[in-house]
């Protein structure tokens, strides 16, 4: 499994393309072959999945029982806007207009890489979300991480 790390600021050009930073390109699994799926994320960001990681998620989603209404609704929402992306010869990725609008992207973006994905945020929205989250980070850390290790102690 890919495990990305880092935060990168980048600029969008007039055609809504961004250059994938060298620091992220170095972290790519060669199996992705510079092919990605760009999708809507949570909290108003976009999520860029390397194709090989998207395929793993898609195989999990195929196990959903689509006769259950909530499963169908989730499947539709999760795939809403999903777009295949290939880097051009200069290492740039094009963001479709509908996804630009969803993420309120204009000229400046932040790529926030973690686990198997890269979130793409408008710089303003990213700073806003991170400043709000930082106020409650200690409480969040306790809630999310506080019980870890207890299993090992038993």
Image: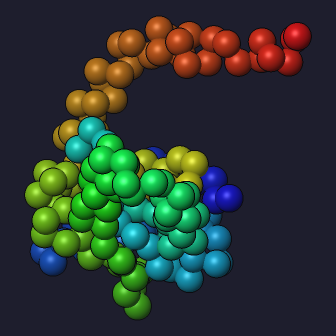
Residue 8: percent from left, percent from top: 42, 53
Give the total of numbered labels: 0
Residue 105: percent from left, percent from top: 17, 55
- Residue 63 appears in view: yes
**Quadrant where the N terminus is found in the figure:** bottom right
Instruction: Look at the picture and state if 103 lies above or below 53.
Output: above
- Using residue 50 as the reference point, say whether residue 127 is left or right of it: left
Q: Quadrant of residue 109?
A: bottom left
- Using residue 71 as the reference point, say whether residue 11 is left or right of it: left
Outermost residue on the front side: it is 67
Instruction: Look at the picture and state if 92 lies above or below 131.
Output: below
Q: Residue at x 37, y 87 (%)?
A: 88
Q: Quadrant of residue 129?
A: top left
- Using residue 77 as the reference point, say whether residue 115 is left or right of it: right
Outermost residue on the bottom side: it is 89
Residue 128: percent from left, percent from top: 23, 30
Q: Residue at x 19, y 62 (%)?
A: 99
Instruction: Look at the picture and state if 152 lies above or below 32.
Output: above
Depth order, front residue of 50/126: 50
Q: How is the image coloured?
A: rainbow
Residue 57: percent from left, percent from top: 52, 59
Depth order, front residue of 66/23: 66
- Residue 74 appears in view: no
Q: Residue at x 13, y 69 (%)?
A: 97
**Quadrant where the C terminus is found in the figure:** top right
């Amino acid at each position: 499994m890919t495990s990305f790390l880092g935060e990168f600021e980048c600029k969008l050009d007039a055609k809504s393309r961004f250059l994938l930073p060298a620091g992220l390109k170095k972290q790519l699994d060669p199996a992705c072959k510079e092919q990605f799926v760009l999708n809507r994320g949570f909290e108003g960001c976009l999520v860029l999945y390397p194709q090989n990681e998207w395929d793993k998620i898609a195989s999990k989603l195929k196990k959903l029982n689509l006769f259950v209404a909530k499963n169908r609704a989730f499947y539709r929402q999760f795939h809403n806007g999903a777009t295949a992306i290939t880097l051009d010869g200069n290492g740039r990725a094009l963001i479709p207009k509908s996804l630009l609008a969803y993420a309120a992207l204009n000229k400046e973006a932040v790529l926030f890489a973690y686990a198997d994905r890269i979130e793409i945020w408008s710089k303003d929205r990213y700073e806003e979300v991170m400043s709000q989250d930082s106020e409650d980070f200690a409480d969040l850390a306790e809630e999310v991480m506080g019980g870890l290790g207890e299993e090992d102690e038993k």
